[in-house]
Each structure stands twice: as structure tokens, then as C-alpha cells.
Image (tube, rainbow, N blue to C red):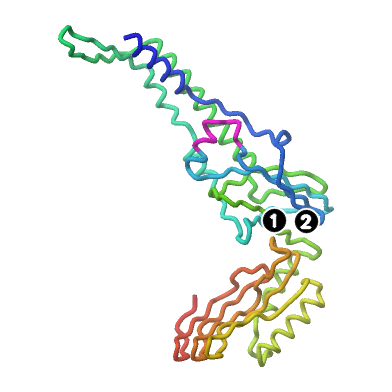
């Protein structure tokens, strides 16, 4: 009987409701640092590591909560989502909605009311046992206290995520912004930012998207198209380098052709970025697909697909 009592006591005290401590960004050591001209970006994973119970549930659900720090050293306001974009290696991030994080992470407060149940074990001389269930005043008090603690802690966690939301937040000139990003957990996280206000107005990049697409009325060949874009982008000082990339089938027929550039507006500053109109061909030489990309390497407009006999099949 003593052993059972000790086990019950251990279970009770190891299952107490967890408290939640709010995130203190100024006490976090940000070990990832990236400089983008007048913007310094850094981040730290395990943003709620001090809250062991919450952090365990976050990781169990394959979620990574990341604390970010952006120091805007420029004289301009920056709006996250409009002027500042986040990338993980080569891809724009898909942030997990805070509501989903809260749903999967918060404690189930009412479950602690089960402590009010009193279990009595009765053994007969023959070795049979019986279990009697009743209401324990001490268990009721213990359950109510833990239910309140869990509810308060959950509320603090929700408020902390909302307070640290990055959605459409404005970063004032010469100021520091802190926030939390929720992502699907990955082994090789490498967060970067794209600064659309870097050197030129954001609208300049947006306006260039139409210009860099191939126009059959003025571009008589792909070489002419490449020359036109190269001249325009170099005149506006938007690129570091530009080239045509293509490949052929074993029979010598063109497999694909497109334009790549290096510029400062991508998270991949030292890498080549696909832009403009890319054409893909079947091995018989007929056009297979036309894909248009904007200046930030995102799909722009429709994708035209053709059958092998040369007839247009669909727009996607």
C-alpha cells in the first residue's frame, strides 16, 4: 500500500500544470547574423525553450518557434510582408498560423479537475481487490488550482504570440524590431530576408516584372529578347550579372532556354536567379511549355502548355 501511495504522489506532482514565462528578446543571444546594407537581421531557434512543457509540445508537433531581430538602420519605414520578405534557403517561408500553434500547444486545463476524484483500493483476504471512487476535498482544491494555473499560462502564451506577430508590422527608421516566426521544423534552417527597398523603390521592381517578359511583337528572337532585357536592367542598375541558360537533347534539339541574373534583392545574393520568359521544348523540337517569372523568381501570369504535335493544350 505504501508503494502505491508513493506512486500516486509522484504522478500527481509530476503532472502539475506548467506556468508560462513571457519571451524576453533582449536576453536572447542571437547567433545568426546577416547584414543587408542598412538592415541587420538575426534570429534564434527555440524561442520558448525556458518554458519546457510548452516547448516540448511545440517540438512534438514538428513546429519551430523562432525569435527574430531586425535592426532598421535606414531612414525609411519598413513594412514586413511588403518591404521585407523572409526566405529559408531558396524558398519563401510558409509561416504556420499562430492559431494552429496555440491549438496544438496549449495545456488542456479542465483535465486537472480529475484530481478531485479519490481512488480507494480495498483488498479482501482472498486476494481480490475492489476500487471505490469518491470526491476528495484535497484533490478538488489541487485540481482547481492547477486548472487556474493552466488557464492563466495558456492565456499568457496566446498573448505572447499575438504581441510578437510579424504580420504587416512597421519597423520605424533607426529602430529594432523583435518578433516570432512559426515554421515547420527543419534540420537545415537558414533564414534570410529579401529587402525590396534595397537601393530602389519597391514599385520599381514591381514595374519591371512586365518589362522582363518576352513580347512577340517586339522580340523577333530569343537573342533579341535577351539583348533588350540586358540593356534595360543594366541601365537601371538592377543587376550584378546576366546570362542565357539553355540545354539540348542528345539529338541536338533545344531542351530549354531562359534568363538568369544576379541581383541584391534576393536572399540568394551570390546565386543565379531565374527571371523572365522560360521556354521548354519536346525532343522533336516543338514547344512544350512557356513559363514567365517575375524579378524575384516567382511565377508571373499564366503557364502555357502545348502538346507534342504543337497544339496549345491549356493555361495554368
Distance from disc 2 to disc 1, alpha carbons, whole Å, reads: 8 Å
Main secondary-structure element of the magenta-colored stretch: helix
x%, y% of residue 49? Answer: 60, 34
**In percent of the image, x 73 and y 69: which residue is there?**
205
Q: Is residue 95 magenta?
A: no
**In percent of the image, x 60 and y 31: which residue is there?**
50
Residue that carries the numbered disc 1 in the rendered image: 193
Residue that carries the numbered disc 2 in the rendered image: 36
Q: Is residue 17 above or below residue 262?
A: above
In terms of image quadrants, where is residue 20? top right
Q: Which residue is more in the foreground, 7 or 232? A: 7
Q: Is residue 54 magenta?
A: yes
Q: Is residue 136 above or below residue 37?
A: above
Q: Residues within 10 Å of mark 2 (few under 14, many from 20)?
A: some
Q: Secondary structure at mark 1?
A: strand
Residue 151 relative to residue 272: left or right: left
Residue 10 relative to residue 190: left or right: left
Residue extending farthest front: 250
In terms of image quadrants, where is residue 134? top left
- Locate the N terminus by quadrant: top left
Q: Secondary structure at mark 2?
A: strand
Residue extending farthest left: 126
**In percent of the image, x 42 and y 23: which residue is there?**
112
Please report contact status of discs 2 and 1: CB closer than 8 Å, yes or no. yes
Q: Residues within 10 Å of mark 1 (few under 14, many from 20)?
A: many
Q: Which residues are magenta?
A: 48-57
x%, y% of residue 94? Answer: 56, 55
In terms of image quadrants, where is residue 111? top left
Residue 8 relative to residue 20: left or right: left
Amino acid at each position: 500500500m505504501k508503494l502505491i501511495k508513493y506512486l500516486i504522489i509522484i504522478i500527481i506532482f509530476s503532472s502539475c500544470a506548467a506556468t508560462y514565462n513571457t519571451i524576453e528578446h533582449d536576453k536572447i543571444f542571437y547567433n545568426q547574423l546577416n547584414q543587408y546594407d542598412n538592415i541587420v537581421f538575426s534570429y534564434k531557434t527555440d524561442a520558448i525553450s525556458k518554458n519546457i512543457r510548452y516547448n516540448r509540445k511545440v517540438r512534438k508537433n514538428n513546429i519551430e518557434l523562432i525569435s527574430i531581430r531586425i535592426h532598421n538602420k535606414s531612414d525609411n519605414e519598413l513594412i514586413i510582408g511588403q518591404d521585407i520578405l523572409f526566405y529559408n534557403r531558396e524558398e519563401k517561408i510558409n509561416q504556420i498560423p499562430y492559431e494552429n500553434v496555440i491549438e496544438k500547444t496549449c495545456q488542456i486545463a479542465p483535465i486537472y479537475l480529475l484530481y478531485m476524484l479519490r481512488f480507494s483500493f480495498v483488498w479482501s483476504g482472498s486476494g481480490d481487490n475492489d476500487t471505490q471512487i469518491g470526491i476528495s476535498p484535497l484533490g478538488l482544491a489541487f485540481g482547481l488550482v492547477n486548472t487556474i494555473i493552466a488557464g492563466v499560462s495558456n492565456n499568457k502564451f496566446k498573448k505572447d504570440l499575438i504581441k510578437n506577430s510579424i504580420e504587416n508590422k512597421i519597423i520605424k527608421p533607426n529602430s529594432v524590431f523583435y518578433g516570432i516566426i512559426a515554421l515547420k521544423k527543419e534540420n537545415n534552417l537558414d533564414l534570410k530576408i529579401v529587402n525590396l527597398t534595397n537601393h530602389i523603390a519597391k514599385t520599381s521592381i514591381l514595374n519591371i516584372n512586365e518589362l522582363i517578359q518576352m513580347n512577340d511583337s517586339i522580340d523577333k528572337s530569343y537573342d533579341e529578347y535577351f539583348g533588350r532585357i540586358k540593356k534595360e536592367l543594366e541601365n537601371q542598375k538592377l543587376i550584378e550579372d546576366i546570362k542565357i541558360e539553355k540545354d539540348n537533347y542528345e539529338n541536338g534539339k533545344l531542351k530549354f532556354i531562359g534568363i538568369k541574373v544576379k541581383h541584391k534583392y534576393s536572399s540568394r545574393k551570390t546565386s543565379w536567379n531565374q527571371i523572365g520568359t522560360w521556354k521548354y521544348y519536346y525532343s522533336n523540337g516543338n514547344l512544350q511549355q512557356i513559363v514567365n517569372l517575375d524579378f524575384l523568381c516567382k511565377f508571373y501570369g499564366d503557364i502555357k502548355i502545348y502538346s507534342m504535335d504543337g497544339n496549345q493544350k491549356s493555361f495554368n
